[in-house]
Image (spheres, rainbow, N blue to C red):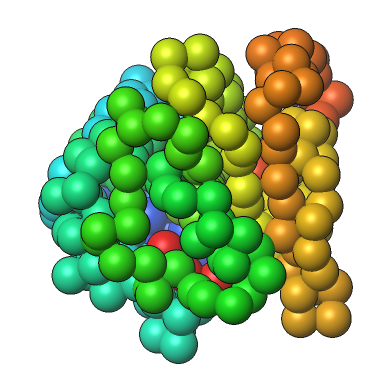
Amino acid sequence: MELDFYEAKQVAELLKMSVPTVYRKAKSGDIPAVGKRPNIKFPKEAIDALVEFGDEEELNTRLVFEPCTNAELWQGLEITRSLYGTEDEVPYKRLIEWQRANKDIFMCLRGGKNLVGAITFMPIDEKIAISLIHDEIREKDIPGTAVKKWTDKGISVYVPTIEVISSGNIKRDRERGQFLLRRTIKWAIMLTIQHDIKNWYAIGATPEGQAILEALGFTKATELDNGKRKGYMLDTSIEPVKLVSRFINEIEMGRNTTLPQKAESLKSGSR
């Protein structure tokens, strides 16, 4: 019978809240419980269901897509470091160099006060973008002086990162991923219309990321690491607005790939 119940500490870990909050929610009826303190138990079946669907209040937290703060850049770096190690990470000093060159390249997705996703669009010289997708250089090798202004002529855009930070809840991550993709696409359309962008480049480091790039109209240009990573290019002369509009419709109808449950979709191995 003990296997059919959780202790308060286990519930707190599963629902990502403090033990006092677990007791408070049990008292209010928000969390099913049997008995009273100190012998209170929590039905495993009920708690597992709440974990699967997520906390309703958190799920309904308003998502905001805005420029990243310096603190969020550091937080994102720490998350990337914990997930993927330090071999190819972009040092924080380099991120600040990029930001000083163009303050409008880092966008963050927030759920309430929490960082839940991020994207970077980097305007650079096309020669550097091509070197990146051929693995001749890595993102950490891009100096701040290589980052262009959006108003410069004949720029190319490299996409280092589109990611959702995993919450452990599939439904929540799917909703956040769809929101981030829609905002990302709208931002890309706006930039393409307003500025002199020749081509877009990216590296798909996962099957999910590769599927998203291909659905957006990107063409595979290179294969790296025995095909595990692929470099892509999007020619802006092939009606990008039409392509992305179709993709938005597919996302909203639930037919297309969304960001995966882990904290990565389009990623070249470093933030």
- The x, y position of residue 96, in whole percent, is 18, 59
Name the residue rendered at 82%, 52% in the picture. 220
Residue 230 quadrant? bottom right
Image spot of residue 242 (x, y percent): 75, 12
Q: Residue at x 32, y 26 (%)?
A: 151
Quadrant of the drawing holding the C terminus: bottom left
Is residue 74 rendered to the left or right of residue 192? left
In the picture, the quarter occupied by the N terminus is: bottom right
Which x, y percent locates residue 248?
A: 69, 17
Query: Which of 6/78 is in front?
Result: 78
Q: Residue furthest bottom?
A: 87
Query: Relative to 120, does residue 37 appear above or below in the rendering?
Result: below
**Which of these two is toward me, 81 or 137?**
137
Q: Residue at x 71, y 22 (%)?
A: 237
Left-right relation of 91 to 233: left
Q: Quadrant of residue 95?
A: bottom left
- The residue sitting at the front extreme is 153
Q: How many labels, in total?
A: 0
Residue drawn at 33 percent across, 57 percent down: 146
Q: Is residue 203 visible?
A: yes
Residue 231: percent from left, percent from top: 72, 59
Q: Is residue 166 visible?
A: no
Residue 144 is left or right of residue 205, and the answer is left
Nearer-the-camera pick, 23 or 179: 179
